[in-house]
Amino acid sequence: MKKHIVIRWIARIALALVTVLLILSAGSCKSKATLTESTMVRDSTVTTVTVVPRDTLVKVPGDSLRLTTTIAELRKALYITETRNRVTAAIGLQGDSLTVDCKIDSLLLELELRDTTINTLRDRLEKIETVENVPEKYVPFLVKLLAWVGGLALVYLGFKAALTYFKIKIPF
C-alpha cells in the first residue's frame, strides 16, 4: 500500500474527529436552571357584627286607687296610707267621710330594641409561586483569552492541513 494514501486517510479521520469534538464541546456548555417552588397559604376569618337600633313606643295603661274611711277612724290613726304600684294620692272631705282618690295617668315608654346580626366569613387563599433560578455563568478573563488563542490555533492548523491536503502552494 502506498504511504501517502495512508497518511491521507489518517488526516481525514483526524479532521473528522476534531470536528466532532468541537461540535460536542460547544453543545455541552449549558448549565441547568433550577426550579424553586414556594407555597403561600393565607387563612383568614372575618367577623362583622351589625347592630340596628329600633325605637318602639309602649303605652302603659293608667291605674287608680280609692280609699274610703270615717273621720273617727282617721282620728285614731291620724294618717292612712295605701299604695298600689306608682299611684299619687289626693285627699278630700265629704260629710263625715274622708275620701282619698289616687290616680296615675297612662304612660308612654320609649323602648330601644337592638337587632344584632353576626356574620362570619372564612377565606382561604392558596398561592403557589414557581421561581426559575438561572445561574449566571462567570468566565474569568484568562479562560476567555485562552479560548480565543486555542480557536485561532485550530483555524491556523485547519488552514495548514487544507493546504497540505490539497497541495496548494502560496506564492509568498
Image (cartoon, rainbow, N blue to C red):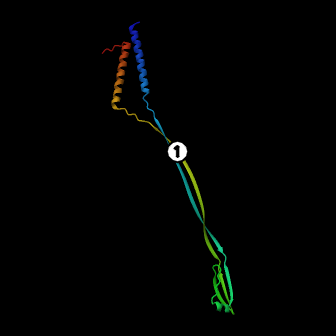
Task: Name which quarter of the figure residue 151 lies in.
Answer: top left
Up the image or down, 7 lies above or below 76; here it is above
Decide if residue 21 is on the left or right side of residue 62: left
Q: Nearer the viewer, residue 2 or 98?
A: 98
Instruction: Report the residue at 58% width, 55% height from top.
Output: 120
Residue indicated by mark 1: 127
Give the SS element for disc 1: strand
Instruction: Report the residue at 41% width, 23% height from top.
Output: 22
Report the quarter where the N terminus lies. Answer: top left
Decide if residue 34 is on the left or right side of residue 123: left
**Residue 53 in picture, x, y percent from top left:** 59, 65
Count of all numbered marks drawn on residues in the image? 1
Report the quarter where the C terminus lies. Answer: top left
Among all residues in the image, which is located at the extreme front?
76
Among all residues in the image, which is located at the extreme left?
172
How packed is label 1: few (under 14 Cα within 10 Å), some, or many (20 or more)? few
Three-letter amino acid code at disc 1? Lys
Instruction: Report the residue at 40% width, 12% height from top.
Output: 8
**Residue 77 in picture, x, y percent from top left:** 64, 89
Among all residues in the image, which is located at the extreme top?
1
Task: Name which quarter of the figure residue 163 lies in.
Answer: top left
